[in-house]
Image: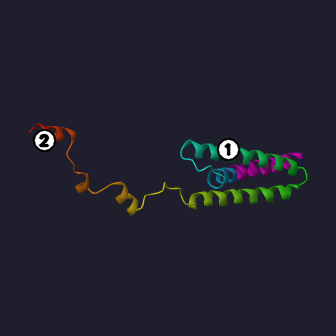
Amino acid sequence: MRAKRFGAGFLFVASCMVFGFFLGGFLGSKVFSSGGMGWDRLADALGGMMAGVIVALVVSVALVRRLSIRQCLLWSFAALLGAALVFWLIRIYPKDEPPQPSQAEVVATFPPPSARRHPSASNLYAHALS
């Protein structure tokens, strides 16, 4: 009986940690992100993953003694389903693309080639000598 209780409790704690890992990574990288690119986004995701695992570990260890074997197994299954749902949300969540300039900004920033044709400094010097 103790082996079954230990196995169910271990499964409950492990599945809650998996759920916390995915949920913390999702919230850290998408919701609570500082808006940076590259290393900043990676640091936000890793921080969220660590926080999610720690919170899930503390909560699941506190609850494991109060739950029966059957409840541990049912909540383990629910936590794994929640982790799969969060993983699916991560996959369908729109990617953050860098903002693309509008056509008006491109035209205003880069003048047409005819406007850029001007005599270079060496041509001005050659014209001054002739």
Q: Which residue is mark 2?
A: 127
Please name the residue shown 64% across and 46% down the image.
Answer: 44
Task: Identify the mark at residue 72; answer none if there is no mark.
Answer: none
Q: Position of residue 63 (x, y in %)?
A: 87, 52
Q: Main secondary structure of the magenta part?
A: helix
Q: Position of residue 65 (x, y in %)?
A: 90, 50
Give the magenta part as a residue range. 2-21
What is the CA distance from the residue labelled 2 to the residue labelled 1?
A: 65 Å
Quadrant of the image occupied by residue 70:
bottom right
Q: Horizontal placement of 129 versus 36: left or right?
A: left
Does dot 1 land on a helix, a strand or a loop?
helix
Please name the residue shown 62% across and 49% down the image.
Answer: 34
Quadrant of the image occupied by residue 106:
bottom left
Image quadrant for the C terminus? Answer: top left
Q: Tell me which amino acid carries mark 2.
A: His
Q: Horizontal placement of 110 versus 93: left or right?
A: left
Does dot 2 land on a helix, a strand or a loop?
helix
Please name the residue shown 85% across and 58% down the image.
Answer: 71
Q: Tell me which amino acid carries mark 1.
A: Gly
Marks 2 and 1 close (CB-CB < 8 Å): no
Q: Which residue is mark 1?
A: 47
**Total tally of numbered discs in the picture:** 2
Q: Horizontal placement of 103 versus 67: left or right?
A: left
